Amino acid sequence: MTARVGSKIGIVTFPGSLDDKDAERAVRRAGAEAVGLWHADADLHGVDAVVLPGGFSYGDYLRCGAIARFAPVMSEVVAAAGRGLPVLGICNGFQLLCESHLLPGALTRNQHLHFRARDQRLRVETVETAWTSAYQKGALLTVPVKNGEGRFVADGPTVDRLEAEGRVVLRYVDGNPNGSLHDIAGITNDRGNVVGLMPHPEHAIDTLTGPSTDGLGFFASVLRRLVAVA
Amino acid sequence: MARVFVDVMLKPEILDPAGQAVARALPSLGVEGVTGVRIGKRVEIEFDGEPDLDRARQIADRLLANPVIEDFTVQAE
C-alpha cells in the first residue's frame, strides 16, 4: 500500500484512553502518519481521518462515553464527520459515537455480566465504508474483543433499517461475546464515513502481539480512500 | 440548598441483566414471590437557589440519561 505522502490520521487521547498508542502504531504500520489529538484541544490539526480509541474515557462514569462526548475535541469531530471526514470508533470509541449520535443505538452491559476478552471470529458484512473497502465482502477475520459493555441495542425499526440499508459492518461468528442484537459487532452511518466497532483491529496488525494481521485492513481501507481523493 | 432528584431507569424493553442477577439471588435470601427486579440510578442535583426543575430536565436529557435506552423523571425534594 503506497499512501499519499502526508496522509495524516488523528488518534484522540482522552483521560482513560488505553489503546491510543496501539492505534497510532496500527496507523503507522498501514503507511500513514499518526497524529496525536488531545481531548481538551478543540482542533483536529488538519488530519484526514480520526480514530477514537478504546479504553475508559473519563472513567466511563455515568455511562461509557457519556462524558467524553462533551470533550472540546468532540464538537470538532462531530462537525467534521458531518462533512464526510472518516471516523473510526473502536470499543469505547464506538460507545462514544453512539453517545454523540453519530451512530444509532447504544452499547449496554454484556448479557452475561462478564467482561469478555478473547480472540473473536468476525465476518465483514459490507465493504461500502471508508474503513472496510480493502476487505472482501464476507471475509472472516480473527480480531481481539475485550469489553464489559459491548451489547449493541437499538429499537426494532432502527435495527431493521441498519440491516435493510446494509449498515451492519461486522458481525460476530462462532459465538456472540456479549448478547449483541443480530450478532452486531460494528455499524456505519448512512454515508459510510463513520464506523463503530467493538472488536479491536489495532490489536491484530502483527502476529508478534496479536492473533492475526486481519485488523490492518481497516487502516489500509481509509488510506486507500485518502489516496483516491488526493 | 435546593435539591432535585433525577431518577434514571432503563426503558422497559431494554434487558437489565444486573437486575435479573439480583432477582435470581433472592431465593437464597429466603425471599419468594418476586417476579422482577430492575436497577436504575438516582442523581441528586443541588442548586444554590430555588430548585430549578427545567434546568434539571435539560441536564437529565443531555447527560444523565441516554434517551435511546433510558427514561428519567425529575422531582424537587
Image (spheres, rainbow, N blue to C red):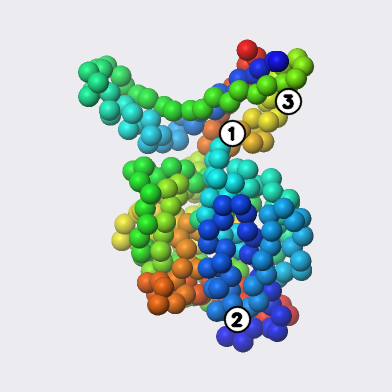
Q: Nearer the viewer, mark 1 or mark 2?
A: 2
Q: Closer to the N terminus: mark 3 or mark 1? A: 3
* Image spot of residue B74 (x, y percent): 62, 20
* Image spot of residue A59 (x, y percent): 55, 45
Q: Which residue is mark 2?
A: A31
Q: Nearer the viewer, residue A217 or B55?
A: B55
| Three-letter amino acid code of the residue under disc 1 | Ala
Q: Nearer the viewer, residue B43 or A222?
A: B43
Q: Nearer the viewer, residue A181 or A49?
A: A49
Q: Residue at 53%, 68% (x, y): give it.
A: A22
Q: CA distance from mark 3 to mark 1?
A: 14 Å
* Image spot of residue A140 (x, y percent): 39, 70
* Image spot of residue A28 (x, y percent): 59, 77
Q: Residue at 64%, 30% (x, y): give it.
A: B60
| Three-letter amino acid code of the residue under disc 2 | Gly
Is A223 on the left or on the right of A199, as rendered?
right
Q: Residue at 60%, 81% (x, y): give it.
A: A31
Quarter of the image for residue A49 reads bottom right
Q: Would you say the residues marked 1 and 2 are in contact, meaning their CB atoms lie under 8 Å apart?
A: no
How packed is label 3: few (under 14 Cα within 10 Å), some, or many (20 or more)?
A: few
Examine the rendering and report whether any part of residue B48 can be seen. yes
Is A218 on the left or on the right of B15, as rendered?
right
| Three-letter amino acid code of the residue under disc 3 | Arg
User: In the rendered image of this protein, does residue A189 appear above or below residue A111?
Assistant: below
Q: Which residue is mark 3?
A: B55
Kindly identify which chain the residue marked by label 2 belongs to.
Answer: A
Q: Quadrant of the N terminus of chain B?
A: top right
Q: Which residue is mark 1?
A: B65
Give SS at disc 2.
Answer: loop
Give SS at disc 1.
Answer: loop
